[in-house]
Image: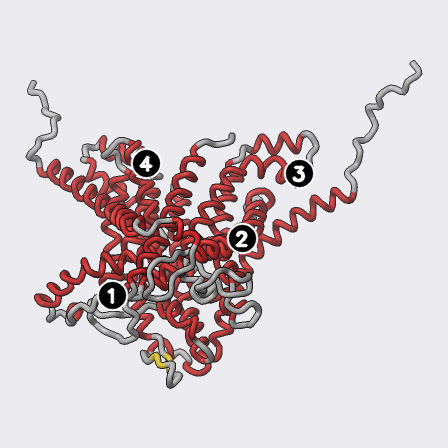
Amino acid sequence: MTAVNLQKKKSNLRTIFGYSMTAVSGACLLATIIPLFAVLIFVAIQGFRSINLNLFLKLPPAPGLAGGGVGNAIIGTFIVVAIATVIAVPIGVLSAVYLSEFSGDNQVARAVRFATNLLSGIPSIIAGVFAYGALVSSGLFGFSAIAGGVALAVLMLPTIIRTTDEALQIVPQDIRWAALGVGAYKYQTVLFVVLPAALSSIITGVTLAIARAAGETAPLIFTALYSNFWPRGLKEPIATLAVLVYNFASVPYKSQQELAWAASLLLVFLVLITNITARFFTRKKAY
Amino acid sequence: MTTAPYSRTKPLASRSDIEKNLEKGFKYLTLAFAVSIGLILLAIAVLIFLQSVPAIKAFGLGFIANNTWNPVTSQYGALAVIVGTLINSGLALLLAIPLGIGTALFLSEDFIPTKIRTVLTFMVELLAAIPSVVYGLWGIFVIIPLIKPVGMWLNEYFGWIPLFSTPPAGPGMLPASIVLAIMILPIITAIARDSLASLPPELRQASLGLGATRWETIFRVLIPAAFSGIVGGIMLALGRAMGETMAVTMIIGNSNRLSWSLLNPANTIASLLANQFAEASGMQVSALMYAGFVLIILTFVVNILAELIVNKVKAKY
């Protein structure tokens, strides 16, 4: 009886095909990740040069002059994103509570989930056009921090709804039954048992939505507009880091380009830190 | 025994009206918020439609087929930007699909240890988190200078092809599409990887048991089985690409002229809006709203198709 050789032959056409395909897909991975490092390294090198205390404390200089900082844009970003968060979090969390706790996956819930997906698919600039039409051109607020905040809130909503919905569904059914079993109302169960149990995942989701909103530019360039001065109120045009990067990227002055790089570094740093901490915290689950 | 015995028949304290109302009220409150999501979506579409009515009346459907965009004479047509949007996102998809699927295959099969795979998957996801304005800045200072010699070479040797018929102007369709491809890669990769990873392990085992090699299994079993998931991911990426604004606006050159050459500056609907809204007035606002409405319809159609395709996959396994 002759033994059949089951060993892969190195020269076999199928083996060679396999190895070369592995190499090709590995190369695809490399080609995908290289831009990430290229962007990070470039932003870090260009941005670090202008990182100093003035960056946080001073206003942008007049065109052509050196020095200055992006203090107004840092505060402005904070204000606009805070407005967006205040609007989006209650709407998003309560909608998700309905989806996961009260709907039992009925027609309404399916329609709302579908609407949420469509909302997450609308281009960010359309959110800006919406806020422009509703608040700016209608004369309600004009170019203002509030209009910018509303535009960003629209973009934050789908993320908040989805993460909260998922977080609530992961909470074990037993603890709802336990709460109801000792006589709690449904609303008490949701508010004092289910929501606290899912709180850390919800906060993670909200934080990621905030990080995303802080980097959004398109909806802000014609709602919050831009201002070279310190914020003067919620009904006034306001500077944000993202719009500052856009405005200063295309001017021919070296000092303004440097500020654009520094502002980019701040944005990228913010996004990376939130993503990495969020990733770290979602790993440990409450239940 | 003088004390009254604990009565077993005493009814539980009945729930007060206030609490009953609280209970109902809370449920309807959450319902109202849930419904408001649909209303917000509706409000966006209706508001933009209403604001574009003057332009729709003035230009009709010819708006889509006309390529003059002249605020001075109040003549508006969106052909150039619509074509620009389609070419820009199409070209980006063409670049991103093979790279994305290749990456997804590498990350879903066991070529490398799980821990390294998790890290690599996370890094691909980080690509999606970088703000688009940062990609734009990077594109201006890195990609445009990097691509220019390639454009020169293409123009010199392949100038007879209309696509490369002009010398590169710096900003233009080609660099914008390359940056856009980088930005939509994570979506394609993530969804293709998920749909490959969620296939039942029996499929792999059966195929390998019949004597197929790993790559034969991938090509003849796994990719066909995950096909609709992968296509759904590509559709979502297309929707994202059509609406992407900042990076494209900063790199594409914003020229509203129609041109065959990929090396020429061009424009997209989103970039047009980004550039002109802040300074627009009168009929121009309405024309911009009309263009925005066209963009909404394009992205809605693509997203609904993606949703349907992805849902079909969920039902299968």
Check disc 4 and report its element: helix, strand or loop: helix
Q: Position of residue B259 (x, y in %)?
A: 23, 73
Q: Which amino acid, by three-letter code, is at mark 4?
A: Thr
Task: Identify the residue position indicated by label 1 in the image.
Answer: B173
Task: Identify the residue position indicated by label 2 in the image.
Answer: A88
Q: Is residue B93 above or below residue B262?
A: above
Task: Identify the residue position indicated by label 4 in the image.
Answer: B118
Mark 2 falls within which chain?
A: A
Cα separation between marks 1 and 2: 36 Å
Is residue A17 shown to the viewer in this render?
yes
Q: Position of residue A223 (x, y in %)?
A: 47, 65
- Residue lying furthest bottom in this view? B73
Earlier in the chain: of badge 2 and badge 3, it is 2
Is residue A111 shown to the viewer in this render?
no
- State yes or no: discs 1 and 2 in contact (Cβ < 8 Å): no
Check disc 2 and report its element: helix, strand or loop: helix
Cα separation between marks 2 and 4: 31 Å
Q: Residues within 10 Å of mark 4 (few under 14, many from 20)?
A: few
> Are discs 2 and 3 both within one chain?
yes
